[in-house]
Each structure stands twice: as structure tokens, then as C-alpha cells.
Amino acid sequence: MNAFIEHHQQVIRLDYSCFDRILLNAIIQVLQSPASVVGFLKEKRLATQLTPAYFRAISTDSHHFVEGLAEQRHVEIVQPPKDVRREEWVEPFYRGLHGQNGIAVILKSRENARVAVSFPSQGNHVELCNRFVWQYYFYLQDQDFGRMFLRICPYFPFNARLCLNGHEWLACRLREEGIGFEQCGNAFRTCADPARLQTLADQFSAAHIEACAHRWLAQLVPFFTDRERRHQGFGYRLFVSQVEYCTHLVFDNRAALDRLHERLLDLNRSIGHPDKIALIFGRRITQHTDAGLKTQILDHDLGQPVIRSEYKSSSIKQYVRDHLVLRTETTSYHTPDLGVNKGVEHLPELRQTMAASNNRYLEVQQDVLETFVDRGQLEQLRQATVSPSGRRTPGLRLDDPRLLAVLQALTCFAFLAGRGRFRTTDLHQAAAEALGKTPETYTLGQLRYDLAKLRGKGLVERIAGTQAYRLPPEGYRIAVLYLKLFHRIYAPLTAGTLNPVPWDDRLPPERRAALDRLYAAVDHALSQLFESVGVRLAA
């Protein structure tokens, strides 16, 4: 079990992980080059002149088909107002279906699309160009996926986009099996059979998505015959454009979750936050990718603060929704950044990668929340280490700025990047910055010496036969412990005692952060202790 979930399981009544929102591009891959477009239209449609009028006739027929379909099924074609959430705006149209499957509404919107364009001055020359054209959003109630939408471009080669939701698919399966549940937005707050819920979530596959997509595309894009789609290579292929994988922890009561989330927000503002999050995404960080790494705490659109970390085109965020659900969500807009091909058939690999990201994120958060110290262990770390060959390596001093800089770099650099290894050169820049120096003034030799101290205590391991290292889980926890003790205990208490900020006392206690109130209480208690034992600070 995940360490975070195990630690808090007494106040968690339901936990599960699943795909949430998935956005897929649907294209006929063989028609994505001009030569293939010309060949298809001449061979399959017997076109003699590929003029602008010819392509205009194709799109006109497509518009007429949509209009006729809407009239036949008594569905409105509307242009939504700007600056509205379409999911909310279409809600009344879904209610009009009265629970039946079908088309709720068709939205018409002018957007950019890649379409075939004829250049008559160059003969039958055709190019695939981006043009601002009308496109149709079919908002659907599907028998297998519940609510979803399919955007179709009525211009050749009829590229499309599909948006569906893993929670909707799961809700349909739970209803089919007669399992009771309570759904609130994109989350289940209760489920009568949590084990079956997770089993169903793990069974969700590309085959389910493809069956749904091809069923609707065959109905809504009649230009291609069934034989062309099935047997001649002119069927749609699906590629992931955006995907979300979430882990939901449903708490018994709001107070317990509020206290926990407040601590997470506070601790992630300082040490332990994954601002270099190869650790989370399992990808190697290089000089070409580290510019895209950052962590920030921001207000979610629901008014909830969010811990959000970004890696290139992917991100992971954690926030509270509906007062009882702690949601950890990995999102990717370009799955190759995670080492996974965009084809929907790679969904199992994508699930494994994104689930591992969520698990590592929660485990890191638990390490940040709790670091236990055994009796005598801290003192042992301070003692010198003697190797079997007799080589003596100094111990670890809590106030050693170079040691703290290396530990800070290790917790931020991401010790599980790629195959879980790093070299001193990978760590050098981050350690120097944490120390307030440059790589020239804090040399590689000094870094190797400092790493040797950590190796002597087994907190950093050398990978046999290589020049690489790895940071085991125990090393990560000790790194967080040292940083906590220095940055969160000794440093702030010393500063508050020796150099307090005068105007802090003017702030009413109820307006101070919870951590600041605790610091003030400790400082006040220390002052009373000093006075009782006859110790006072020199002027």
C-alpha cells in the first residue's frame, strides 16, 4: 500500500485511481499527406479536377448532412456564447434527453482546422493547410461512456476530436452491475464495492474507447463507406492529445482533510517540494528540459488552493474538492514527454506511468509530512565513518551549509529520474545554487567530497560498474529530516529569538498562519525557560 494512504487510512473511507478526462485526436492517417488526398479522390471518388469548387461541394454536402440529421432527430444546432463553460451551458440540453442515449445538442463554432486546400493556378495541386472554418461539436449521451462530445470538421479529410471521461465510463459499469455509488462531478464519494470499482478502473482499455469512437464516427462522417473504413485503410486512428489520471482519497470528515491539506500547503512552500519533478514523472532531467520545471501554489477555479508541479507539457496537481476528496492528478498534453507513444493502443503503458507518478507524489508528500527519528540515530550520523580499508570520512553536521545544499539539491533534483540514477554533474548546478555559489566557486571535487560523506552513511549509493549514484528511500527521508530540522526548527526559532521582526507583534494572533503561531508559542516558552533557569541573552 502507498505510504501516504497507509498512514492516513483510519480517516480515509474510499481510495481509488482511474483515468479521468481523455481528449483524443481522430484522424485518417493515410489522408494526412497531399499526395494521399489526391490519390484517394481520384481513385475512389473518380475526381478529374481537384478545384476549390470541388472541395467546396464536399463541405457543403457535409453541412447539409448535419442540418438534416439535426432536423431528423429534433436536435438544435446552436452557437454557444463566448466565455462560458460549455459543460455547464449544455446541461439543459442533456436534461432534454430524459436519460436516453443520443445527441443532446450540436454546437457550431469557428475554429482552426487542418483541411485540404486546392491551388488551381498550380494544376491539381493540393495542400493540407490550417484554416479558420466552421466545426461541429456533437454532445452525446453514449451507452458505454455516458456524457461525451465529438468535434467533427466538415472539411476534407474530416479530422475529428473526441472527449470522454473515465468516471462516466465507470459510472455506467457500476449501474450495469447494480453497485450503489454516489458521484459528485468527476469523483465518487461513496461506493458499495470499492474493490470492484478499482478492478473496473484497471480494466478500462483502448478497446472500449475505439469501439465507442468508431461507432459514432461511422454515423457522423458518412463520406467514407463501411468497406473503406474497415478493409481499405481509411478508418480513423486515435491519438491522445490530453489525458488525466487521478487518485482520489475520500476522507471521513472535512476537518481531518482540512488539517492535512493545510499542512501540505505549508510544507510544499518550502523544503521538500518537487520543483524539479523528474522524481514524480520518472524522466531524466537535462539542461534541455529543466527550464520547464516548476512548482507553484495557486488558486483553483473552484476557489481551492492547488499544489501544482509542471514538467515540460505534463503536470501533477493536488487539491481538495467537495470538502472530502483529496485529488492527486497527473495530466499530460504530450505523452512522449513521459516516454509513451500517443497512440491510444498504448493506454496500458500510459496508465502504469501516470499511476506511478501519482504514487510517488503521495509518497514524497508523506515523507514531507512525517520524518521519524530513532533514539541515537541522529548522533550516529554525526560520527565519522571508517571504511573497511581504514579510510576515515567525516560525519554529517546538521549546520554544515555544504551538506544542506547537497541535500536540498537531492530532494529537488529527483533521485528516481529515468532509471533512478544521477551523476555528480547532474547535481552540481542545483547544489551550487542552493549554496549561493556558482559551479566555479563550489567545485565538482567539493561536491564529490560531500557526497562521500553521504555514501559513508549509506544515504547515497554508488551503482556498481558506473559513475552514477542513486538515492535510496532512506536517504531521501534523512535528507528531508535534516532540512526540516535546520530550515523549519533551528533557523526560524533562532531568528525569532535573536532577531525578531518588530511589526510581527502588531499582527493579531488570529490573523497569523498556524505555523507562525506555533513558532511564537515555542519562542515564548523558551523565554520563560531562560528566565526560570537564570539565562538571559546578552544585549
Image (cartoon, rainbow, N blue to C red):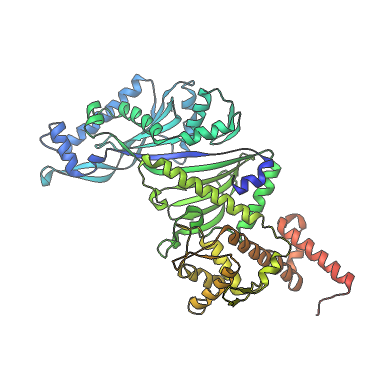
Give the percent coordinates (x, y) of residue 232.
21, 32
Question: Left of 501 or right of it: where is 35?
Answer: left
Count of numbered circles in the view:
0
Q: Is residue 469 visible?
A: yes
Q: Let me know if residue 507 appears in the view.
A: no
Left or right: 110, with 430 as reference point: left
Q: Quadrant of residue 256?
A: top right
Relative horizontal placement of residue 511, taking residue 294 as reference (left or right): right
Residue at x 68%, y 41% (from the top left corner):
11
Residue drawn at (39%, 33%) of the image: 209
Vertical order, 491 against 538 (above or below) = above
Asked whether 368 or 125 is in front, the reply is 368
Which residue is the extreme one toward the front?
388
Asked whether 281 or 145 is in front, the reply is 281
* Location of residue 242 in the rendering, given as x and y in whole percent from the top left corner: 42, 44
Q: Where residue 457 appears, x then y in whole percent? A: 61, 68
Return the x and y of residue 408 as percentages of the image width and height. 57, 66
Q: Residue at coordinates 56% horizontally, 68% vertically from top-left?
A: 455
The C terminus: image quadrant: bottom right
| Quadrant occupied by the N terminus | top right
Q: Nearer the viewer, residue 170 or 353?
A: 353
* The quarter of the displayed image where residue 104 is located: top left
Against 297, residue 40 (above or below) is above
